[in-house]
Image: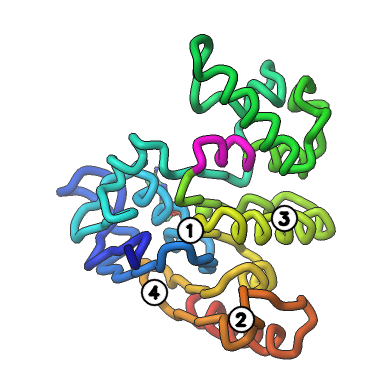
């Protein structure tokens, strides 16, 4: 399967089909399976709305969308999609471990052992070994986002949707999590859609960066980042090529705002 996501003439908005205000109009977007797509755009242009349609949290008003070759609903039912938001909604009264296990919501049975192992593995992977019995308020912001990522990864989703997941973190922590995310992406082969306000973050992470424009939301720029990077989407943040790509994205973003 070549494309993880394919939209054709996709219209999305809020309210009933008759009264709806369209947020995205006529969006044609194909996202290659296993790729890392960064999404930039002015506030309110519909970035979160786009992720919501992909995640089956919102029905389109028109056009078509296929996710992993299927309907968003089928993909969600199979737990093939993971979602991480800016403010990770951890349950404050549950331990880190229980927050990670939350989506599967299994208490008993044969699966428990596997889930336990998997939970430990993910906590380990996210640098949270030894934090399993802590409560969310005993963690830093960066650690809480790691828990949210571990939770999103529990079902081994083939598609990971991230909506400004590191927006509230300091720059050092954000850079570190960016690198962890890239290595995770390389190991899992998952498709990642990553919304961010940061041009630098979008350029560093994405194999491709799209810029959405507002009113109505539409594709304003579609930049292949591979020419600016080494093989395997590798680059250094100070690379002149990356800096040049960032300048190009900034121009597109200014035009779109
Ligand atoms: N639940 C909702 N009901 C009505 N309008 C909404 C809702 N959520 C978002 N919107 C509107 O849709 C537009 C796009 O929002 P959003 O996708 O959150 O933008 P972004 O994530 O790019 O900042 C905005 O104008 C916003 O006000
Ligand atoms: Mg948003």
Residue at screen point 50% across, 81% down? 223
Residue visible at 59% across and 35% down?
A: 151
Instruction: Give the side of residue 1 with respect to residue 80, left or right.
Output: left
Query: Which residue occupies the foreground of this view, 192 or 21?
Result: 192
User: Distance from label 4 to label 2 (Cα)?
Assistant: 15 Å
Q: Would you identify the image quadrant in which residue 28 lies?
A: bottom left
- Region in magenta: 149-156
- Judging by the rendered image, the residue that carries numbered circle 1 is 191
Q: Residue furthest left?
A: 18
Q: CA distance from mark 2 to mark 3?
A: 25 Å
First in residue order: circle 1 vs circle 3: 3
Label 3: which secondary element: helix
Alpha carbon separation for disc pair 1 and 3: 15 Å
Q: Residues within 10 Å of mark 3 (few under 14, many from 20)?
A: some
Give the total number of marks visible in the rendering: 4
User: Is 35 above or below relative to 137?
Assistant: below
Q: Work out whether 96 lies above or below 66.
A: above
Give the residue at x 51% y 27%: 103
Mark 4, secondary structure of its residue? strand
- Which of disc 2 and disc 1 is earlier in sequence? 1
Helix, strand or loop status at disc 2: helix
Q: CA distance from mark 1 to mark 2?
A: 25 Å
What mark, if any, has residue 250 been given in the picture?
A: 2
**N-terminal label among 4 and 1:** 1
Q: Mark 4: few, some, or many residues within 10 Å (few <14, many ≥20)? A: some
Badge number at residue 219: 4
Question: Residue 1: percent from the left, percent from the top?
Answer: 32, 63
Mark-to-mark CA distance, 3 and 4: 29 Å
SS for callout 1:
strand
Q: Earlier in the sequence, mark 4 or mark 2?
A: 4
């Amino acid at each position: 399967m070549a494309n993880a996501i394919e939209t054709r003439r996709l219209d999305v908005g809020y309210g009933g089909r008759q009264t709806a205000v369209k947020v995205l109009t006529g969006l044609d977007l194909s996202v290659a399976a296993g790729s890392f797509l960064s999404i930039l755009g002015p506030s309110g242009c519909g970035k979160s709305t786009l992720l919501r349609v992909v995640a089956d949290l919102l029905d389109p008003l028109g056009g078509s969308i296929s996710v992993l070759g299927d309907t968003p609903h089928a993909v969600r039912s199979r737990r093939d999609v993971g979602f991480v938001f800016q403010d990770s909604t951890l349950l404050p009264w549950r331990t880190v471990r229980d927050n990670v296990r939350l989506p599967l919501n299994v208490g008993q049975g044969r699966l428990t052992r596997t889930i336990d192992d998997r939970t430990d593995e993910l906590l380990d992977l996210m640098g949270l070994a030894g934090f399993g019995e802590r409560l969310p308020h005993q963690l830093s912001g960066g650690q809480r986002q790691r828990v949210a990522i571990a939770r999103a990864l529990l079902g081994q989703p083939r598609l990971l949707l991230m909506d400004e997941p590191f927006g509230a973190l300091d720059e050092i922590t954000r850079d570190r999590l960016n690198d962890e995310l890239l290595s995770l992406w390389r190991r899992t082969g998952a498709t990642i859609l990553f919304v961010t306000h940061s041009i630098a973050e979008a350029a560093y992470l994405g194999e491709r960066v799209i810029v959405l424009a507002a009113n109505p939301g539409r594709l304003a720029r579609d930049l292949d980042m591979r020419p600016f990077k080494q093989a395997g989407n590798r680059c250094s943040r100070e690379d002149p090529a990356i800096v040049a790509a960032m300048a190009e994205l900034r121009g597109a973003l200014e035009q779109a705002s």
